[in-house]
Image: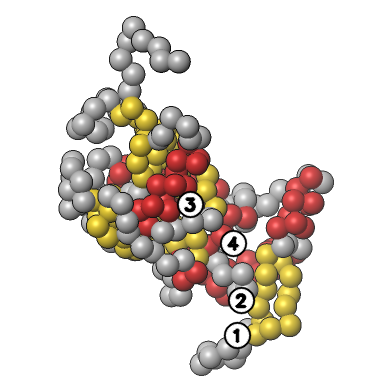
């Protein structure tokens, strides 16, 4: 049943900050080029308006799939952004999410109100529409912090990886080198990785053993009071 409110209601949108790691261990973010005003032709985070029959997460996943073709990924709510003049169209509040993918496993395809979808290195972003640079910066800070106390970094890796790639991931996101011996000793001692009877292929150096993250083991250890900390 329709209801007449005494006060005007702001509109609600969702925006997604999608981080991906490429084969060179470069951290990137997924952007779309808008084909509708405002900011037509400019780069922005994928996102859009929440429909009345959707949850926030359903809306975020739908918009992400429609504008970039990226689906079935790790997605977590980040923050609510409600500056009064953040959108020139109206009073619009946005709920931001951040997502993590191994970008080599996801083909991007711009549709609906996006002319193009493209990965950009996090240190070489174009000018962004709305307040999306601020949203991106908040998401990057969350990623850097959470990477140390939850094993979300494995979402950026392929299912099978050498320990060197895992270390490069942490060094890339945290922006500093890590001691190889200490890093490997600590991560292996946690008991969260399964050593596979597989090795790297097509490499110029000595092939390294591949490992896989065991999410079920992590959940079991977590219930026993285990704390992931690197």
Gap in Å between the C-alphas at discs 4 and 1?
18 Å
* Residue topped by disc 4: 154
Q: Residue at x 25, y 40 (%)?
A: 130
Cβ–Cβ under 8 Å for marks 1 and 2: yes
Q: Which mark is residue 200?
A: 1
When the figure is inspected, residue 197 is found, relative to residue 157, above or below; the finding is below
Identify the colour scheme used.
secondary structure
Gap in Å between the C-alphas at discs 1 and 3?
27 Å
* Residue topped by disc 2: 162
Q: Residue at x 46, y 66 (%)?
A: 106
Q: Nearer the viewer, residue 211 or 149?
A: 211
Assess disc 4: are there few (<14), some (14-19) or many (≥20) residues with their C-alpha within 10 Å of its C-alpha: many
Name the image quarter holding residue 48. top left
Q: Residue at x 62, y 73 (%)?
A: 160
Cβ–Cβ under 8 Å for marks 2 and 3: no
Cβ–Cβ under 8 Å for marks 4 and 1: no
Instruction: Return the x and y of residue 186 as percentages of the image width and height.
Output: 69, 63
Gap in Å between the C-alphas at discs 2 and 3?
23 Å
The tag earlier along the polypeptide, 1 or 3, is 3
Cβ–Cβ under 8 Å for marks 3 and 4: no
SS class, disc 3: strand
Instruction: Return the x and y of residue 152 as percentages of the image width and height.
Output: 58, 54
């Amino acid at each position: 049943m329709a209801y007449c409110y005494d006060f005007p209601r702001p509109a609600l949108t969702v925006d997604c900050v999608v981080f991906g790691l490429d084969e060179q261990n470069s951290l990137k973010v997924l952007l779309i080029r808008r084909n509708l005003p405002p900011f037509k032709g400019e780069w922005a985070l994928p996102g859009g308006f929440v429909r009345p029959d959707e949850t926030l997460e359903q809306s975020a996943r739908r918009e992400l799939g429609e504008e970039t073709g990226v689906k079935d990924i790790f997605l977590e709510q980040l923050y609510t952004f409600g500056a009064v003049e953040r959108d020139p169209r109206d009073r619009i509040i946005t709920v931001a999410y951040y997502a993590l993918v191994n970008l080599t496993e996801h083909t991007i395809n711009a549709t609906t109100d996006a002319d193009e979808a493209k990965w950009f290195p996090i240190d070489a972003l174009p000018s962004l529409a709305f307040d999306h640079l601020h949203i991106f910066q908040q998401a990057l800070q969350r990623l850097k912090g959470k990477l140390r106390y939850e094993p979300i970094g494995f979402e950026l890796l392929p299912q099978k990886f050498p320990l060197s790639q895992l270390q490069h991931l942490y060094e890339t996101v945290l922006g500093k080198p890590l001691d190889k011996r200490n890093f490997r000793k600590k991560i292996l001692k946690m008991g969260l990785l399964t050593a596979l009877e597989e090795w790297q292929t097509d490499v110029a150096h000595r092939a390294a053993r591949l490992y896989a993250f065991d999410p079920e083991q992590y959940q079991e250890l977590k219930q026993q009071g285990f704390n992931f900390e690197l």
